[in-house]
Image (cartoon, rainbow, N blue to C red):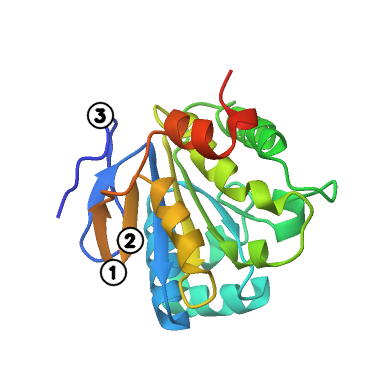
Amino acid sequence: MHIKTSDQEKLELGIGNYSCNWGIHIAGLYETEQERDEIINGYLKEGAMADDMQLYCPAEQSEAEFRTKFVHHCPACETKLNDSEYFSISSVKDLYYPDGVFSPIAMDEGLDRFYAESQMNGKRNIRATAEMVWALEAVPGVEHLMAYEARLNYFIPDKPWISICLYNTTKFSGSTIMNVLKTHPYVINGGILTQNPFYEDPAKWLAEHAPQFLKK
């Protein structure tokens, strides 16, 4: 089933039988490890088969656990999994707070650098996904996580990029999940991809909740 999410090229999502278009920001909601792994493994397997660049940040599982399960899910993906031209697996600290403090502005700058480097040798499609349970820890600046999520809706459109931010609904509060819904235009829940009726334009959300991070 194809869901038109932008005017960019079509891609196979690797989740259910869904296809969509590049330039999309998705909240992946799940309750169980099995649900989480079905999203991650299907999504990244499809990307590996398509020669996309994969950016993945494990938090609820270790990198070693992911590698074992992913190779079991897709034995043909093992070579690409071990090739930095195709897979970039980052620790939570290295991706989100390398200087010890989480900052939406620093995240913008880091993603801009990653994207520019990825495109140096020509157009490259990028699939990103991260397990967001790290945000339950007492990381300085983590209170600005949703401002970062809102600002991703400025960064991702018009790029050959798709992000799935993975939230375990048994671990996050209902109020946090509601803000997740307000900052992600699309949602995967129960293996189903839908346009999110709770989504708010980032300028509106930021003006109300984090005006210091409004795009200038």
Q: At which x and y percent is residue 169?
A: 45, 72
Q: Is residue 99 left or right of residue 79?
A: right
Mark 2 to mark 1 CA distance (whole Å): 6 Å
> Count of labels shown?
3
Q: Which residue is mark 2?
A: 188
**Residue 216's quadrant in the figure?**
top right
Q: Residue type at mark 1: give it.
A: Gly
> Which circle marks residue 71 in the picture?
none
> Which circle marks residue 191 in the picture?
1
User: Looking at the image, which residue is at 42% across and 78% down?
Assistant: 31
Q: Earlier in the sequence, mark 3 or mark 1?
A: 3
Q: Residue type at mark 2: give it.
A: Ile
Circle 2 packing at 10 Å, graded few (<14), some (14-19), many (20+), is many
Mark 3 to mark 1 CA distance (whole Å): 24 Å
Q: Are marks 2 and 1 in contact (CB under 8 Å)?
A: yes
Q: Secondary structure under badge 2?
A: strand
Q: Residue type at mark 3: give it.
A: Asp
Q: Residue furthest right?
A: 99
